[in-house]
Image: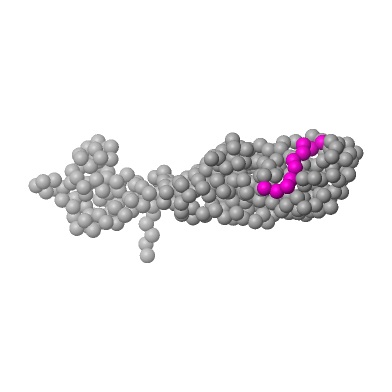
Amino acid sequence: MHETDLRGIDLGLLALFEALLDTRSVTRAGDRVDLSQPAASRALARLRALLHDPLFVRGPDGLVPTRRALALRAPLAAALGAVRALVAPPVFDPASATGTARILAPDFDAAALVPPLLAAFGTAAPGLDVALLPRRGDALVALAADDADLAVGVYANAPAGFRRQRLYDDTMVCVLRRGHPALARPLTAARFAALDHALITVTGEGGGVVDTALAQRGLVRRILLRVPSFLAAPLVVARSDLVVTMPRRIATEFAAIAPLVLVEPPLPIPRFTVSQVWHERQHADPRHAFVRTTLAAVAAANVRTGGRRAP
């Protein structure tokens, strides 16, 4: 089968062909596609050479399409429709959208952000679902492989090929059970280091910002329990003499439902920023933009209400 070389084909000629079929006039067809009458006549000559057919002949009431021209009307309309759809700006209607927003997030961020995100989707995009993905390795690798749409967490910057948006800032706070013996006196750095600690660590290894701050004072703590979940840790602490240092926002949530006391750390621990990160490939996609804009909005509302549900 002979394959046509598309490099020399001007899409403007096909648009003129469509206009000629509709108007049966070179002048009116030229006006529709913004060509002068002489330029439209020259374009018609090029069309005839391209399609090896006169396409139109003179009649008493204007141009009369040939049999080949009429036979090409339907495929021409389909081809131009496909081209117009290809180059048209993408349209996204949240109300009719379906599919799943795939989000990588620590459980404490998910606990704070996903309920209002689902509520926002329920109002504006009821057909959209949310999948919270398990963290297996580097989140940026998952984004690059298109295994996730967004990653939420602490990201100091966005590497080349990624975008980053700040969601909110948070600080760390010490969490102990109500009635813990250590609460009888002010918590100094030395007394704090002497307590039995729980450490929230996804990998199960290493230390954290608390260990760094203690080391600067020549102090070391005992990590009696390593736990991978921000949600499990405060519940364990509520029934033991352990202390855990964790993000204030989720700690405040747990202190409202469990017998826990929040205490300021007796040593400076830097505040941190929670951001959402996505791959550059997704940036211009209107569906993705809706998801991340909605997530940013619910994060801002969460900050305004201190993590509590707005009435």
Q: Nearer the viewer, residue 15 or 251?
A: 251
Q: Does the magenta stretch include residue 259?
A: yes
Q: Is residue 177 visible?
A: yes
Span colored in magenta: 257-266
Q: Does the magenta stretch include residue 39?
A: no
Q: Main secondary structure of the magenta part?
A: loop
Which quarter of the picture shows residue 157? top right
Vertical placement of residue 69 versus 26, above or below = below
Q: Which residue is drawn at 21% across and 52% down?
A: 55
Q: Nearer the viewer, residue 279 or 1?
A: 279
Q: Which of 251 and 19 is in front in this view?
A: 251
Query: Most extreme residue toward the bottom, as rendered?
Result: 1
Measured as percent of width and height from the top left, residue 120 is found at 50, 46
Measured as percent of width and height from the top left, residue 46 is found at 28, 47
Vertical placement of residue 267 versus 220, above or below = above
Measured as percent of width and height from the top left, residue 66 is found at 18, 55
Q: Residue at x 20, y 39 (%)?
A: 27
Q: Residue at x 57, y 42 (%)?
A: 309
Q: Horizontally, is 270 left or right of 191 in the view? A: left
Measured as percent of width and height from the top left, residue 187 is found at 84, 37
